[in-house]
Image (cartoon, helix red, strand yellow):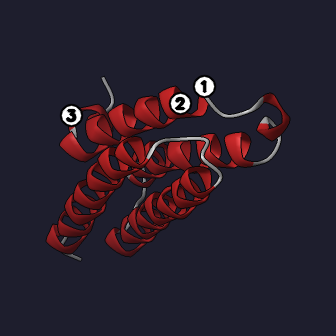
């Protein structure tokens, strides 16, 4: 088992990505290479950067990967807002994903701050 697999933030990021994937199933087929693809990539990037950062040889490097992870959370929020604006997802679905994103970003940020150089 890799050490990142024990991290609650990584587990939550995987869960969030799965939720985003579910939400993209309802997007129109013509968005497959646009909004759908971008949402999936951003969602996957969250857990991927947490995992990749865990292999860093320095705390500043690890923090950088966690920063990227947080930025990917923000990216999904922006893209979900667009998906809702286009009526591809409901306001309720956007709100639920927004709440999960907000909590995930806070937890990643708290973990980042807990790392000591």
Residue 82: percent from left, percent from top: 61, 59
The residue under label 1 is 25
Compared across the picture, whether 114 is left or right of 60 comes to left
Q: Nearer the viewer, residue 66 or 38?
A: 38
Q: Are marks 1 and 3 in contact (CB under 8 Å)?
A: no
The residues tagged by marks 2 and 3 sit, at their Cα atoms, a distance apart of 23 Å
Q: Label 2: few (<14), some or many (≥20) within 10 Å?
A: some
The residue under label 2 is 21
Q: Give the mark, 1 or 3, whose residue is nearer the N terminus.
A: 3
The residues tagged by marks 1 and 3 sit, at their Cα atoms, a distance apart of 29 Å
Residue positioned 27% across, 54% down in the render: 99
The residue under label 3 is 6
Q: Give the mark, 2 or 3, whose residue is nearer the N terminus.
A: 3
Residue 62: percent from left, percent from top: 38, 64
Q: Are marks 2 and 1 in contact (CB under 8 Å)?
A: yes
Compared across the picture, whether 55 is left or right of 88 comes to left
């Amino acid at each position: 088992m890799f050490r990142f697999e024990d991290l609650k933030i990584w587990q939550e990021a995987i869960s969030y990505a799965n939720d985003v994937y579910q939400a993209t199933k309802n997007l129109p087929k013509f968005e497959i290479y646009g909004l759908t693809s971008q949402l999936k990539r951003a969602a996957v990037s969250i857990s991927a950067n947490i995992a990749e950062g865990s292999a860093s040889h320095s705390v500043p490097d690890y923090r950088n990967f966690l920063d990227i992870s947080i930025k990917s959370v923000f990216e999904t929020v922006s893209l979900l807002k667009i998906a809702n604006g286009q009526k591809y997802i409901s306001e309720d679905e956007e709100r639920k994903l927004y709440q999960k994103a907000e909590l995930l970003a806070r937890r990643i940020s708290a973990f980042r701050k807990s790392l000591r150089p």
